[in-house]
Amino acid sequence: MKKKGGEIMNPGIYATWYELEEESKPEFLDWMHNSYIPQELTRPGYLWAAHYELGYVGEAVQKVVDTLIYDKSSALGSGRGFLILFGGLSAYTFFDPNPNQKEEQQDENTSKMLGMRKEVYTCTFSEEYRVDGLDVKQRGPGITTAPAIQMGNFNIDNYTNETETCSWYAQYRLPFMTEIPGCIGARKLLASSGWGKHSILYEFTSLEARENYFVPHEANSNDEKVWTSKILPTLIHAPCSPNVGKRIWPNK
């Protein structure tokens, strides 16, 4: 948490999931990495950015994903190609100006380039709490999120189940994340705007570390002897959730 004007503020994250047509990828990614992101990071309160290519869930976890409950609303973007995260002093950072106001102020080229994105889905989050992993010192550059991530976004089917889900994170999943090699950390997020109230962001040193140390734990989620099997049926996921990404900017 950070202090601003005497008040304690939780860090904010603005997340955008989207897809691109294959032929537009080279032009878009060059513009995104060399023009758009650097310009956005000059805005007051913006601290870091990370851009991920998605699609690395893997066969073992995909079997779990196939059993999840999804919102089928056509109004929700289902982007599973890319995810861009901007980190701010707080969620407040991303509401002054807000995304609609920024869109009104865009120049013609920015509007054209952002218009290449398909199935766009956005949320603005505050960090509810976080834990550090054994490899937290490998975070970076700076405070940027990790080279590999897994991120989920969901609602809970009934408010009466929220205590159980939050307890599962506090007592089971997040303590596990502090114990496995290759984990940089994990962040439980709450949305200020966007469809999904809850989000979880797991950070790894590499896709290989996730596969070796996290996937065996995640793959047994539907085992009735495991607490997770009681949680999953109460969650309603966004179409883009969960997904696994490899960071493509910054690429250090």
Image (cartoon, rainbow, N blue to C red):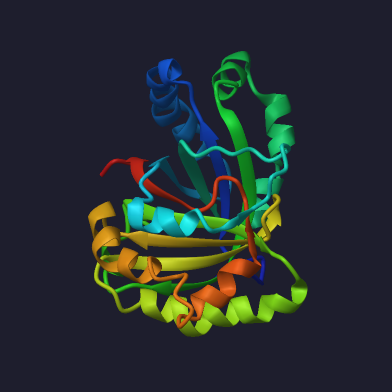
Q: Residue at x 31, y 68 (%)?
A: 216
Up/down of 36 relative to 190, above or below = above
Q: Residue at x 32, y 55 (%)?
A: 140
Q: Does the image show residue 147?
A: yes
Up/down of 88 relative to 32, above or below = below
Q: Write down the quadrant of residue 128 in the picture.
A: bottom right
From the viewer's perspective, tell me whether residue 230 is left or right of residue 187.
right
Q: Residue at x 49, y 26 (%)?
A: 20
Name the outermost residue toward the front.
224
Q: Closest to the observer: 248 or 153?
A: 153
How far across and how far down the image is residue 29, in percent?
41, 26
What number of labels is visible? Answer: 0
Q: Closest to the observer: 134 or 59?
A: 59
User: What is the quadrant of the C terminus in the image?
Assistant: top left
How far across and how far down the image is residue 38, in percent?
44, 34
How far across and how far down the image is residue 162, in percent?
68, 75
How far across and how far down the image is residue 94, in percent?
65, 47
From the viewer's perspective, tell me whether residue 73 is left or right of residue 224.
right
Q: Residue at x 49, y 66 (%)?
A: 187
User: What is the quadrant of the N terminus in the image?
Assistant: bottom right
From the viewer's perspective, tell me whether residue 177 is left or right of residue 44.
left
Q: Does the image show residue 144?
A: no
Q: Closest to the observer: 73 or 79?
A: 73
Q: Closest to the observer: 122 or 94?
A: 122
